[in-house]
């Protein structure tokens, strides 16, 4: 995955609690395991007025004008603002794939489902936990006539909006993985020389295993 870079992005305010992974990417899209191409189907059942299926051309599909993702104020949003327990439900990794494919790089919420939270880090998304009062204040700001823009500084662990700085916490190991662009496969490949040396030794002492 790509290394995480500091950026300033538009905030998409999804004012719903307990958003489950089937809402993020409905079950019919789980047939593919390519990790790409899911962006057009993000929040499919809320985003469109018809029923979506894999490989559909979404450009001509009727859109729900009342759903926040279709509001032109939030075009190109890279920061998703949500309420508590975001990403609950099944453990499908397709949910962070869809968010990342759409362009979401950071999520702000008071709490997350554990598996979804972990999967975000493995797919280049930074899920930030903020207290409910701060989240409520951000919703009020993001719902104005002009879209709210937030600067995200992962090394400094801060969010900046109009001169106000909000600090956030992140596990040091996960932070470093994001900054270096390392998923589980990338972490393993950092030790490829040691793995090859071990395999060579095992072939000498236990050739029947090979």
Image: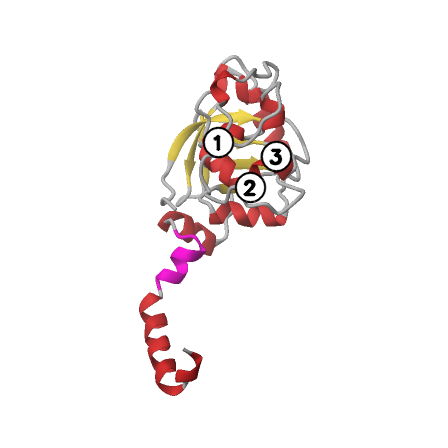
Q: Nearer the viewer, residue 163 or 137?
A: 137
Q: What residue is drawn where x is 48% and y is 49%?
A: 122
Relative image position of residue 124 (x, y in whole percent) = 44, 44
| 199 w.r.t. 5: above or below | below
Q: Residue furthest bottom?
A: 205
Judged left or right of residue 207, residue 117 is: right
Q: Given contact means CB atoms under 8 Å apart, are the residues at marks 2 and 3 in contact? A: no
Q: What residue is drawn where x is 53% and y is 16%?
A: 71
For label 2, the residue is 31
Report, in whole angstroms, how far the alpha carbon at label 2 lies from the one at label 1.
Answer: 15 Å
For the C terminus, the quadrant is: bottom left
The disc, 2 or 1, on the residue closer to the chain's N-terminal end is: 2
**Numbered disc in front, either 2 or 1:** 2
Residue 137 visible, this angle: no
The disc, 2 or 3, on the residue closer to the chain's N-terminal end is: 3
Judged left or right of residue 201, residue 28 is: right
Magenta residues, as a range? 182-190
| 11 w.r.t. 20: above or below | above
For label 1, the residue is 39
Crowding at dot 2, Cα within 10 Å, few <14 / some 14-19 / many 20+, comes out as few
Q: Nearer the viewer, residue 88 or 51?
A: 51
For label 3, the residue is 26
Secondary structure under the numbered disc 3 in the rendered image? loop
Q: What residue is drawn where x is 56% and y is 16%?
A: 63
Report, in whole angstroms, how far the alpha carbon at label 1 lies from the one at label 3.
Answer: 12 Å
Judged left or right of residue 39, residue 67 is: right
Relative image position of residue 156 (x, y in whole percent) = 41, 44
Relative image position of residue 131 (x, y in whole percent) = 62, 38
């Amino acid at each position: 995955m790509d290394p995480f870079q500091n950026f300033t992005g538009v905030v998409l305010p999804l004012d719903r609690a307990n958003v489950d992974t089937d809402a993020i990417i409905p079950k019919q899209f789980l047939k593919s395991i390519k990790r790409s191409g899911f962006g057009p189907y993000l929040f499919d059942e809320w985003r469109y007025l018809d029923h979506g299926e894999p490989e559909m051309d979404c450009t001509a599909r009727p859109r729900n004008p009342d759903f926040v993702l279709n509001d032109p104020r939030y075009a190109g949003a890279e920061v998703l603002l949500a309420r508590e327990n975001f990403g609950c439900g099944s453990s499908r990794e397709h949910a962070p794939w869809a968010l990342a494919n759409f362009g979401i790089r950071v999520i702000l919420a008071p709490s997350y489902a554990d598996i979804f939270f972990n999967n975000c880090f493995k797919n280049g998304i930074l899920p930030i936990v903020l207290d409910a009062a701060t989240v409520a204040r951000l919703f009020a700001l993001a719902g104005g006539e002009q879209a709210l823009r937030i600067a995200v500084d992962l090394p400094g662990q801060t969010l900046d909006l109009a001169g106000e700085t909000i600090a956030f916490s992140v596990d040091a190991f996960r932070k470093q993985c994001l900054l270096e662009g390392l998923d589980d496969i990338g972490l393993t490949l950092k030790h490829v020389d040691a793995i090859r040396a071990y395999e060579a030794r095992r072939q000498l002492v236990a050739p029947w295993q090979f």
